[in-house]
Amino acid sequence: MNDSNWSIPGSSISPETGRGGQANTAPPAAEIARAVELLRAGDLVALPTETVYGLAGDGLNPVALARIFEVKQRPLYDPLILHFAEAEAAFAVAREVPAAALALAKRFWPGPLTLVLPRREVVPDLVTSGLPKVAVRVPAHPLALALLRAFGGPLAAPSANRFGRISPTDAAAVRAELGDAVPLILDGGSCRIGLESTVLEVNADGIRLLRAGGISVEEIEAFAGPVERANVARGTAPLAPGQVAHHYAPRKPLRLLAPGETPPTEPGAGWLAFGFVDCAANAVIKNLSSSGDLREAAAHFFRSLRDLDDHPDVKIIYATQPPAEGLGLAINERLARASAR
Ligand code: AMP
Ligand code: MG
């Protein structure tokens, strides 16, 4: 909660790493116990992860799952990711686990990687939108892991925002998005990664990228060999939040800038910049990373977009696209969808 005294403020970005701060203190037993009580009753809890804040509910309870869709105003055709404290529990809901999935989990879990595997019967249809596969992940945030352990089962936890809007990367953003619709918001500071997980479908004959995210495709490929990614660009992957054309959207119009372009000199221009910016630029500027660091840019991305959206002097947002390499690919994907209206 915002008023709890154990949490660190959601605004801390460490100057050494450019990454969001996370609570180092032991998670508070009372807050965890309260969260578990709510979850067991089929209620929802907002929780921090290293990617973005999630709106969590009991992943095996259809009432809780229905509530997630209701609070987010999310269409039922968008499947949810199940979160687990350990890989063993995650793989227990899968009918088959290809060797590559085991290896990826060993290398990248806990972390911002989601694996899509054939589902077992135990997984409710609401989780998978009726698809034959289920998406599973072990998150890396200490507070999320503490809650998962205490709860003792999977949590479905899509981003804690209304469908199609900007993902929250701190507790204040969750409050702004969902207000009183969620009875408890666990505050774990700013999200370290700041982008949703990378989603991979792992089959016996290969790995397919369904959503670019917090671990770059280059890093996956360096470890696991070639990853098929054509479907992401074509947008033909299974429908899901990250997959719909218009998503991650601010309320104000957002226009993408061509490489090297600066925003027009007009009153009300906001600039979501990346890299060096001429200080004569005539706009309200949020620079994702003045040094051009893509990890820093990812960590600042959703908060900066939200700040420009909320800024009283900004009427239109212009965005510089970072290079489409490393985490830049995931940032550009989200920018393209945010500008798609
Ligand atoms: P999020 O709302 O951030 O938790 O992420 C949902 C994402 O998980 C979607 O963008 C899909 O790429 C992916 N996803 C979840 N469940 C499935 C599934 N059963 N099959 C394919 N992709 C899935
Ligand atoms: Mg989302």
Image (cartoon, rainbow, N blue to C red):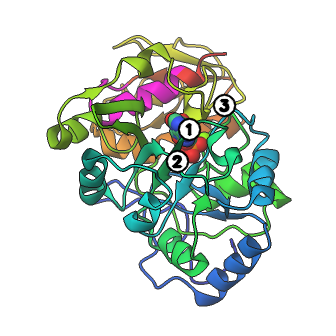
Question: Does 161 sit above or below residue 183?
Answer: above
Residue with the mark numbered 2: 119
State the CA–CA distance, disc 3 to disc 1: 33 Å
Task: Look at the image and say whether residue 331 sits in the magenta stretch.
Answer: yes
**Ligand 1: does it lie within 8 Å of the C-beta at label 1?**
yes
Which numbered circle lies on residue 250?
3
Mark 2 Cα-neighbour bin, 10 Å: few <14, some 14–19, many ≥20: many
Q: Is residue 274 left or right of residue 102?
A: right
| Percent of width and height locating residue 16 | 27, 60
| Percent of width and height locating residue 44 | 74, 63
**Disc with the residue nearer the chain's start (3 vs 1):** 1
Residue range highlighted in magenta: 322-336
For mark 3, give the secondary structure: loop
State the CA–CA distance, disc 2 to disc 1: 6 Å
Which numbered circle lies on residue 132?
1
Front position among marks 3 and 1: 1
**Ligand 1: does it lie within 8 Å of the C-beta at label 2?**
yes
Q: Is residue 139 visible?
A: yes
Asked whether the residues under the numbered discs 2 and 1 touch, taking CB atoms below 8 Å apart as contact, a structural biologist would say yes
Quadrant occupied by the N terminus: bottom right
Query: In the rendered structure, which amino acid carries the disc numbered 2?
Result: Arg
Q: Is residue 249 left or right of residue 95?
A: right
| Percent of width and height locating residue 30 | 65, 88
State the CA–CA distance, disc 2 to disc 3: 35 Å
Q: Which of the two residues, 312 or 338, is positioned nearer the viewer here?
A: 338
Query: In the rendered structure, which amino acid carries the disc numbered 3?
Result: Pro
Q: Is residue 113 left or right of residue 2?
A: left
Mark 1 Cα-neighbour bin, 10 Å: few <14, some 14–19, many ≥20: few
Q: Which of the two residues, 338 or 133, is positioned nearer the viewer here?
A: 133
| Percent of width and height locating residue 276 | 31, 30
Q: Is residue 147 left or right of residue 124?
A: left
